[in-house]
Amino acid sequence: MSSPFIELIAFKVSQPLGEFYLTKIPAEELLKITFSSELRPNVDDSSEGIEFTGTQRAKKGEKLRQIGRYIDSVESAFPNSIILAANYQNNGLFVDDEIIKWRVEPIDQGLYKIIIPSREKLASIVDGQHRLEGFRYAENSERLATELVCSIYFDLPLPYQAYLFSTINHNQTPVSKSLSYILYGYNLEDETPQAWSTEKLAVYICRQLNIDPSSPFFKHIKVAPQIDQILLENINNSWFVSTATIVEGILSLITTNTKRDRDELAKTSIKNGRKRSELSRFEDDSPLRKFYLNEQDVVIRKAVENFFSSVVSNLFTDQNNAAFITKTIGIQALFDVLKENLKIQKYNLELDITQDYFDHLLRPFFNISFSDNFLMQSSAIGRSRLRNFMLYTLGYKPEFDPRDLDREITQRRRLIKVEDLNEYNRILAERN
């Protein structure tokens, strides 16, 4: 593997919203790896309205020129940090490619190493876009070497980015009313649930799961990188999962295209009656889509809450056997299982999301060691292997899928212990 583009030394800062990493990056390098997406109207005569794209206020030429002149001065200084949200693309989608995504590794004595593999623009500027862009207007090229303080959040969902942006700027340059209404819905007036995009609903449910004492995720969700050694360090055998993991898992149950939903709703301002039911004209086979469209959010939350209550009660109790599925790819694979089950229930025109039902569903997993070396592959391949094993064990995936290697079939049979096969087959036959 080639050397990374940049390696940075950073230290972690913990605050109520979550954790971020404080470091410094030269302006010249920062310009190469970050982006800010300006809010623009796209007028299309064939459409019924104006579609808005982007997330930031328009850059003001005169303001940038003023900043450029200040940068050229002998007393220029930028002590405030530029806030970045790493591992997002310009279209708002999360980066899940392990080869290119930014990552964090602990060093020692409270220090961390941030690894940026390439020059790809995979960090959104949450705050400080004018400050950074002003370096393009400086006449003194040596100023590009200026080190800028950066606060880097990892895997910070877009609604949280919007929240930070609007909150930080509330007492500075006012955020325009149209920007708040059209895109964020965080400032000026409370946004009603009927106007929530799939993304905002997923974030809302994620927050509720983290603060409700009866939730299986109570105090287990953090705004943090989807990197297990960071999430698990110094936790005394407890487990944590990133906000992004939960938000994306919930989204997989209610939409096949987050960006489409977000952009379509943005065509109508909140004050003019934005409604999520406007999205019903799109074909979307997500298993809980109709409950999102009908504002039956409690069904979506209960499906997630009861499924993972069963997981925690039955699979997380033995730390030796369950340690691996408490990590990021384990939670991701479990969401894949939940999604597949709900799709089958939807196809059969039924829906049972009680914990008793999920207890019964997960029984084939009870005697399986999820810390087996065959399953413990912390990568995209590992998630696929774990997901396929789970789906096979539940009878949702045929044993002789032509895409599977013989070794994988053999290992699956080994993990379902011989002494358990009769009980396993009985459970599957009973359910089918």
Image: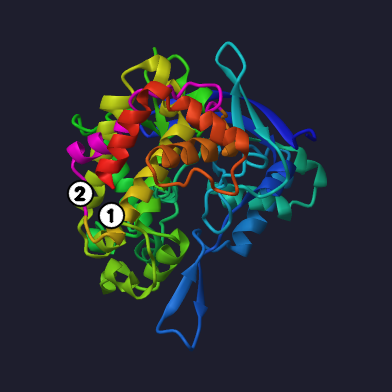
Q: Quadrant of residue 355?
A: top left
Q: Which mark is residue 328?
A: none
In the figure, is residue 59 to the left or right of 222? right
Whether tag 2 and tag 1 are in contact, CB under 8 A, the answer is yes
Instruction: Give the residue type at disc 1.
Output: Gln
Q: Where is residue 350 drawn, in percent x and y?
A: 21, 57
191 horizontally vs 383: left or right: left
At which x and y percent is residue 417?
42, 23
Q: Which corner quadrant of the image does residue 281 belong to? A: bottom left
Magenta span:
351-376
Is residue 378 within the magenta segment?
Answer: no
Residue 76 lies, in percent from the top left, at 67, 40
> Gap between marks 2 and 1, in whole Å?
8 Å
Q: Main secondary structure of the magenta part?
A: loop
Q: Is residue 42 above or below residue 226?
A: below
Work out whether residue 242 or residue 330 is closer to the camera in this orientation and state it: 330
Tell me the tag on residue 352: 2
Q: Amino acid at mark 2?
A: Asp
Which residue appears at 79% of the width and 52% of the height? 139
Element class at badge 1: helix
Of the residues under marks 2 and 1, which one precedes in the sequence?
Answer: 1
Residue at left offset 54%, top offset 48%: 401
| Secondary structure of residue under mark 2 | loop
Q: Is residue 211 left or right of residue 127?
A: left
Q: Can residue 186 be seen in the rendering of this structure?
A: no
Position of the N terminus by quadrant: top right
Q: Is residue 40 above or below residue 327?
A: below
User: Which residue is under mark 1?
Assistant: 345
